[in-house]
Amino acid sequence: MKLLKYTLLAGAMVMGATSAFAGEALDRVMSKGKLVVSTDAEYPPQSSINADNELIGFDVDVGRAIAKQMGVEAEFVTPGWDVITSGHWAGRWDMSVGSMTPTKERAKVLDFPVVYYFTPAALVVHEKNTSIHQTSDASGKKVGVGVSTTYESYLNKKLVIDADGVPEFSFVINDADIRTYDSDVLALDDLRLGDGVRLDAAFTALPTILEAQKNGYPIKVVGPEALFMEPLAIATAKGDAELNAKIKDAVTALRADGTLSKISEKWYGGDLTQ
């Protein structure tokens, strides 16, 4: 199998223009025959680097499929999540396929041309925990989350999801002692050290929790209910309607021909794309 080319980017980068000129990004992609895609290097099963130094995962396969549908090659870069969500990409990459929830705050600097799948957000504790039986029991506890994520916004009671069809949710965890990490998996790493050793709970997407459990993490999900349902969208630099339309058309075609469903079945064992 051909190795996937990816580039690890440093966190400190020169910030550029606030938005793309109309058509500029799409012209660059089509003329170079290359779609540069940003994603997370430490977010399995969505995206991670395996033992063979290959970038793999659901988001990686989706990014590659979008590029193929557009008739170009995919090249992946892995800047920090806070760098991706801050916008102002200045042409360093063309789109993000990183399981990003479209929020009002993020929409100030990014466009979200299309939602491509949905996941429940869940609270998780160490398997020996006996004090957190329901999600509200995490109030006042040490809860780990990825920095600049919707989970952090939820705990701060600032989360607003602007997407059609998203079920209403309420903030049931009060005054959490929020501990932020560069990735959600790092929070799970601390949680598995023991109940209350560094964290009392962690908060992330259910597929990430299930992947960790499959890899032997001694953790358990709190309660059957999701704290909120996340629509996950493709993100682009603000202002290039032509590129947005091309990406939306590509995802629509991949959903219609069953490609998105097949990728979801491969990584999640079920179809989360509908």
Image (cartoon, rainbow, N blue to C red):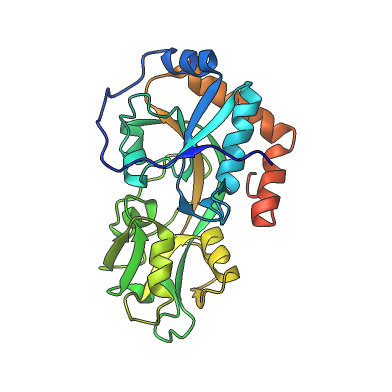
Above-or-below relation of 149 to 218? above
Q: Is residue 104 visible?
A: no
Name above or below for residue 215 compared with residue 31. below
Can residue 77 be seen? yes
Report x, y in % for residue 87. 32, 33
- The quarter of the displayed image where residue 185 is located: bottom left
Check the image and report above or below for 33 versus 235: above
x and y percentages locating residue 231 in the rendered image = 51, 45
Report the residue at 41% width, 59% height from top: 184
Residue 111, relative to residue 50: is it above or below? Answer: above
Specify the quadrant that holds the N terminus: top right
Q: Where's residue 36, x and y in %?
A: 48, 29
How many numbered marks, from 0 up?
A: 0
Q: Residue at coordinates 53% horizontally, 23% vertically from top-left?
A: 34
Residue found at the far right of this picture: 257
Image point 34% across, 81% down: which residue? 196
Q: Where does residue 263 sit, x and y in percent of width and height?
A: 67, 45
Identify the residue shown where x is 37% and y is 25%.
238
Horizontal arrangement in the rendering, residue 23 relative to residue 89 (left or right): right
Instruction: Name which quarter of the figure residue 11 lies in.
Output: top left
The quarter of the picture where the C terminus appears is top right
In this rendering, position of residue 273 left or right of residue 229: right
